[in-house]
Image (cartoon, rainbow, N blue to C red):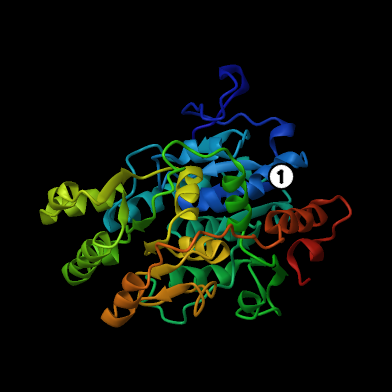
Amino acid sequence: MVRYRPEQGPSPRAGVQGSMPVHPTEKPRLIAILGTRAQVIKMAPLLAELERRHLPYRLLMTGQHQATVDDLLDEFGISTPRERLYEGPEIKGMAQAGLWMLRTAWRLWRRRANWAPKPRRHTIVLAHGDTFTTLLAAFVGRLSGTTVAHVEAGLRSFDWRHPFPEEITRILVSRVARIAYCPGSWACGNLDKRRTAIVDTRANTILDALRTALEKPAAPGNNNDTPYAVISVHRFENLYSRERMGVILDTIRRLAERLRVILVLHPTTEKRLTELGRLEELQQNRNIELRPRMTYVPFMQLIARSRLVISDGGSNQEELSYLGIPTLLLRMATERQEGLDDNVILSRFDPERITRAVEGVDTTTPRQTATLPPHHPASIIVDDLMKRLSPAATDETAGGRR
C-alpha cells in the first residue's frame, strides 16, 4: 500500500511504496475505500463534511480508475492523505479487473491490522455504490470483522442483466453491510430492516456534489448562451454493440441538424469511435463540438445550461432530475427512480422514444434556473456516523438496527 507521510510535503496526492508505520493519531475508526471517478464525486461531499467537523478518517484508493481521480478530490478540497493500494494502469478489461481485484483484496486483507485497529467491530468501512471497488471494500471489510456501511444503498433495477454487473454487486453488498445509507424511502424499502440498520438520507450525496459545482465560478467555455445539447456515452454495453452504436451515431447526426451538439469524448468512447472509423465524420460536422472528458465541476456547469442531455450514466440521471433538464437515458433499465416520467426518458433503445426526445428539444424558451432540493445527505450521514463512533456508542449501536 502506498502511504503519504507528512515529511514528504503537504500534498495529499503524495505516496511512497513500502511499510506503513502507523501512529495512534493515524488510526481513525472510519475507513473510506474508493476506486472510481463516480465514487469519488459522490463521496467527496461526505469526506468534506467529515473534515469540516474534524472527524478523522482514512482514505484508501484502490486504483480502479486513475485518470482525473486526484483532480476530482482536489476540486472538492479534500485534504486527507490518499493511501494507494494500486498504481498500475487503469482497469479496462474484465481479465485485468479480476487480477487487480484479487491482488488488491489480498493487500487489504494482509494489512488489516494496519487500517482496522482492534476491536475491529468498532471500525466502520464506507463502501459506496455498485462497482468492483464496492464489492472489494464490503467483503474484505466484513471478513476483517469491521462494520460495513453501504452508501447509496437500496437501489434496484430488479433485472440482473441491466445494469450488469452493477445490479448483482448491490445485491451481494446488501448481504454483508450492517449499515445502509439509502437515498430515499423507495431505496429504504428495498432492504431488510431485520438485518441492516437503515438510514434514509432523503437524497443521494450527488445532490451535495451538484450544489457545490453550481456554486463555483463558471468554467471557461461554459457561459455560452447559444442553445446546445450534451451527449455523454461511455458504457461498454453500448460502445461494443454495433447495433446500439449505430442508433447513437444516427441520434447525434439528427440532433446536430436541430442545434449545436457537444459530444464528450471519454477515452473509451474515442477509442471505440476510432475503431469504427466514425471519429473523423463527427470531427467534420460543424455543428458538433468534441470535448475531452472533464472533471466534475465544469461538466455539471455544462449540462446545467443545456437544452437536452443524452447519457448512459445513472448518476447523470439523478443530477439532471434535480436540474430539470430534458434527458434521454440510453439504457435498457435503470436502478434509479429520479426523473422518470418527468424530465427523464428511459430510451430502452426504442426508436419512438428517441425520436420524441430529439424532435421535442426546445431551443426557444428561456432556460429556467433550477431550485435544488433542500436536503443535505452528507450531513445526515455524518450525523449518524458521529453517534456510532462516539465513546458512548454500544456494540449494538455500531452494528445493529436503528
**Crowding at mark 1 (Cα within 10 Å: few <14, some 14-19, many 20+):** many
Instruction: Give residue 24's position: percent from left, percent from top.
Output: 74, 33
Horizontal relation, residue 50 to residue 370: left or right? right
* Residue 272 image point, x, y percent: 19, 54
Q: Residue at x 56, y 53 (%)?
A: 42
Q: Is residue 96 visible?
A: yes
What residue sits right under mark 1 in the picture?
Answer: 50
Residue 387 location, x and y as percent? 82, 56
Left or right: 92, with 374 as reference point: left
- In the image, residue 81 sits, relative to residue 295, either above or below, namely above
Classify the position of the C terminus by image quarter.
bottom right
Instruction: Determine whether, in the image, residue 341 is placed left or right of residue 283.
Output: right
Q: Amino acid at mark 1?
A: Leu
Identify the residue at image location x=17%, y=68%: 246
Q: Is residue 187 left or right of residue 288?
A: right
Question: Where 226 falls versus 193 (above or below)?
Answer: above
Q: Quadrant of residue 200?
A: bottom right
Residue at the far left in the pictured view: 277
Residue 280 location in percent, x, y? 13, 48
Which residue extends farthest right?
A: 392
Q: Residue at x 51, y 44 (%)?
A: 297
* Residue 36 visible at all: no
